[in-house]
Amino acid sequence: MLQVPALWVSSIAEALQRPTWDLYLGRKHCAPTEFIYQGTFAEAEEAKGVAQALANTKQLVADYQVQDGEHEGEILTLMDVPVQFGEQKRYRDRRVTVIAAEST
């Protein structure tokens, strides 16, 4: 889910639907298996509903959820926030919590 200022919505939606270059999720070998753009939604709950419907259609089940910050669950420190690009790349850390999905 991506939140953007209202003035940018149409240009970002257009760019995601017709990218100049191939889209990757972090690394070149991590190409998405589904279209990145799934629509524009006024409310987060509507976007989550569409995401859940897509997951149900594809019979996908969440094993875990990762949340920024420290919460109940396994807390990890990741060095993945870019500070400097180029030949001398630098990253800073951030804390995340891995929360296991409830078994049904």
Image (tube, rainbow, N blue to C red):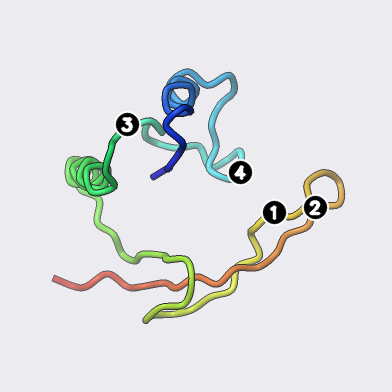
Nearer the observer, 6 or 92:
6
Q: Are marks 2 and 3 in contact (CB under 8 Å)?
A: no
Left or right, residue 20 beside residue 46: right
Q: Amino acid at mark 4?
A: Arg
The nearer-to-camera label among 3 and 4 is 3
Q: Amino acid at mark 2?
A: Lys
Q: What residue does disc 2 label?
A: 89
Q: Earlier in the sequence, mark 3 or mark 1?
A: 3
Left or right, residue 12 beside residue 88: left
Q: Amino acid at mark 3?
A: Thr
Q: Are marks 1 and 2 in contact (CB under 8 Å)?
A: yes
Say few, some or many: other residues with alpha carbon within 10 Å of mark 2 (under 14 / 14 to 19 / 20 or more).
few
Real-space CA distance between mark 3 and mark 1, rounded to the nearest whole angstrom:
27 Å
Please give the label number shown on residue 40: 3
Q: What residue does disc 1 label?
A: 82
Vertical relation: 60 (above or below) 50: below
Real-space CA distance between mark 1 and mark 2, rounded to the nearest whole angstrom:
8 Å
Nearer the observer, 71 or 58:
71
Q: Residue furthest right?
A: 87
Please give the label number shown on residue 27: 4
Which quadrant is the C terminus positioned in? bottom left
